Image (cartoon, rainbow, N blue to C red):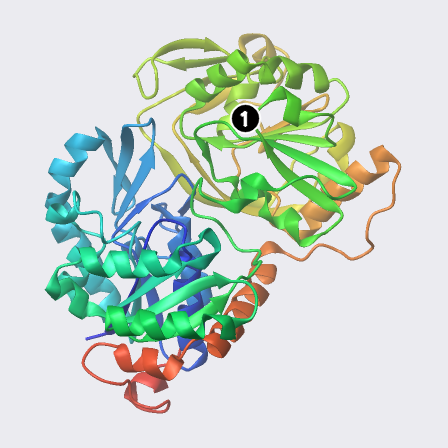
Amino acid sequence: MSKVIMIQGTMSNVGKSVLAAGLCRIMRQDGYRVAPFKSQNMALNSFITKEGLEMGRAQVMQAEAAGIQPMVCMNPVLLKPTSHTGSQVIVNGEVLGNMNARDYFAYKQQLIPDILRAFRKLEDYADIIVIEGAGSPAEINLREHDIVNMGLAQMVDAPVLLVGDIDRGGVFAQLLGTLMLLTEEERARVKGLIINKFRGDCTLLDSGLGMLEERGKVPVAGVVPYMDLALEDEDSLTGRFARKAEGCLDIAVIRYPRISNFTDLNVFEQRKDISVRYVTTVSELHHPDLIVLPGSKNTMGDLKWMRRNGIEAFVKRLSEEVPVWGICGGYQMLGEWITDPANVEEGGHLRGMELLPVVTELKRDKVRCQTEGRINALQGIFSTLSGLEYTGYEIHMGQTGWSEQARGNTREQEPPVVLCSGNVYGTYLHGVFDKGSIAGTVVQALAEKKGIQTEAAEFEDYPGLKEKQYDRLADTLREYLNMEEIYGMLREAHLEERGSAGGERGGN
């Protein structure tokens, strides 16, 4: 049986996902076959495996850090919010249906067999499983039917590292208050405390750490400094949304209420001369060099939101001189019509932005696939993308085809991978910019249009950039965490030294 360790937090966004990824990379470097696991994830950023199954991106990131292919058994339950009170429920990578919060709360214990089967699959593969919790284990109203924090820890007999975020303030109250609200049996599972995102002189915490250990009866396993990492965010709690324009090239991303898969723009963050801003109002939009309409979990609702607050009209006006790029739901919005005869989202018909000659019909069956190829011939500012190799994936509820007028003016049966009309571009392809050659070509085209010189350094492929970030993360955690103590927390006993039967299996 695999050794297991679980990362839980005092609240959302304390850094559980990143710390779990760091442990995965460290243990892989130490020669172990390691895999991540999260029984239930709530996020609008998702990924499609080679088998065409959907899972949360946090576990994809952790799998990359572990040096293995993402597998849907790493995240058997994924909730994608469709409203303030409801979500699309995805089990084992496939859509189960939409549920409101109360119905899902009553239903979720029926998913325990699926969760345990997924976990057992990982046990067949891994020497070590690094489990990530969700939110806080001290939500006393959710304890009864918990399947993701202490409830899961009990099911798989996992020791727990509890993480608090000092950057938000009140970290001692976070950690001690969480311990206080746990049951005696749950507290016994907490083997170490981690203070995350510290800025400054760590010695100033010494007296507080001593009192924390004295009152909490749990050792502090480390104080981790704040790290500005170019890694993917799981959901709308990301700090990326607060960033301001600093570079000489400005990319504005429309941040609608149900924005999803905004990781498509992360590749541009490796360059300081490029700003990626997420905007919610016309006053924030200004006059950028590129406007991106990203993915959406509710295309019709988010288009109505843009229509109400004036962003749609402003984008249409800017599109006469500023390039606009729509991805997935954003692509659907740019068309002439969106129809929803099956009530997948809101039902009925909705006029699109009428910037691309396509119409979309939302359907119950979700398209899920990985894809690769070469970008078709394009016109306009991004004509230099024509013929470049791409890799990515599609994930959408709907089919997009030519409008009636466009169908009569083309010989093509279906719209190409990237459709362009004037300054407007649309694609279903997530990860379309991840290739360094594509990102670099986009930036070069924008710089030439603006009449400026950009940094000469070429873009690195996004996967290669992330590999360096995982190594940097692991180096930092090795320095600031007591890894010997953490290895000792693994179930049953210390792992054998590298070179034992477990270690020889390696982490390739």
Kindly state the secondary structure of the residue where label 1 is placed. Answer: helix
For image coordinates 19% across by 62% down, the residue present is 153
Expressed as whole percent of the image width and height from the top left, the position of residue 170 reads 39, 55
For image coordinates 70% across by 50% down, the residue present is 437
Q: Is residue 276 left or right of residue 36?
A: right
Task: Name the image quarter holding the C terminus.
Answer: bottom left
Instruction: Kindly indicate the quadrant of the structure image that contains residue 421.
Output: top right
Instruction: Kindly indicate the quadrant of the structure image that contains residue 264.
Output: top right
For image coordinates 35% across by 32% down, the residue present is 366
Q: Is residue 223 left or right of residue 255?
A: left
Is residue 55 at least partly visible in the picture? yes
Image height of 399 relative to 431, above or below = above
Expressed as whole percent of the image width and height from the top left, the position of residue 132 reads 31, 59
Amino acid identity at mark 1? Tyr
Which is nearer the eye, 256 or 419? 256
Is residue 431 at least partly visible in the picture? no
Crowding at dot 1, Cα within 10 Å, few <14 / some 14-19 / many 20+, comes out as many
For image coordinates 12% across by 38% down, the residue present is 107
Q: Is residue 335 left or right of residue 94?
A: right
Image height of 423 relative to 232, above or below = above
Expressed as whole percent of the image width and height from the top left, the position of residue 67 reads 44, 68
Name the residue tied to disc 1: 331
